[in-house]
Image (cartoon, rainbow, N blue to C red):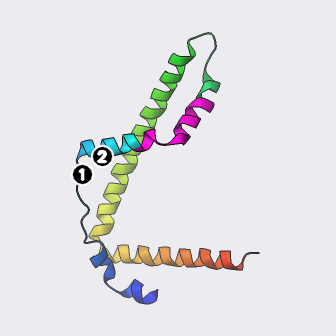
Amino acid sequence: MLKSWLSDDFAEKNDTKTKSLTMTRLIYQGLFNNLMNPKALLFFSMFLPQFTSSQIDVTSQILILGLLLSTTALIINILFSLVFSKLGSFINGKLSLGRHIDGILGLVFLGLATRLATSK
């Protein structure tokens, strides 16, 4: 592990380019992923009805709550992607920093594995 931490392999690993995808293709992939996610259906059917009133149309209330939840999630996801895109560019610009992060994460995983192996 120490040998890989001190080597310059990090620069070679991160030089590979990912294939570029169009924005439309990414949106369709995200939509398909969300439609195939059963957790979202369970969440909307079990959690949101608690916040509705029986005196008003329940369907419209659930649609409004779902739209509010989706809008909030969209804003948070956009903020996360902007922040981590900048962070990724910064780390890729400093190859030694990326190598040290790899080493630190390796030590963390070794520590977790040791703890798991020694637990009863």
In magenta segment, residue 99: no
Quick check: 2 above or below 16? below
Secondary structure beneath label 2: helix
Q: Residue 19 appears at what percent x and percent y?
A: 24, 59
Q: Residue 50 appears at what percent x and percent y?
A: 64, 26
**Identity of the residue drawn at 73% across and 75% down:** 119
Main SS class of the magenta portion in the image: helix
Quick check: 12 above or below 90? below
Which residue sits furthest top?
Answer: 55
Residue of label 1: 21
**Identity of the residue drawn at 45% across and 88% down:** 2
Residue of label 2: 26
> Residue 47, can we see it?
no
Q: Residue 17 appears at what percent x and percent y?
A: 24, 65
Which residue sits furthest bottom?
Answer: 3
Q: Is residue 70 left or right of residue 38?
A: left
Quadrant of residue 47 in the image?
top right
Task: Determine contact: label 2, label 1, CB under 8 Å.
Answer: yes
In magenta segment, residue 43: yes
Q: Nearer the viewer, residue 90 or 102?
A: 102
**Identity of the residue drawn at 31% across and 57% down:** 86
Q: Residues within 10 Å of mark 2 (few under 14, many from 20)?
A: few
**Identity of the residue drawn at 48% across and 73% down:** 105
Secondary structure beneath label 1: loop
- Mark 2 and mark 1: Cα distance apart in space: 7 Å
Which quadrant is home to the C terminus?
A: bottom right
Quick check: 96 above or below 82? below
- Mark earlier in primary sequence (2, 1): 1
Quadrant of residue 112 in the image?
bottom right
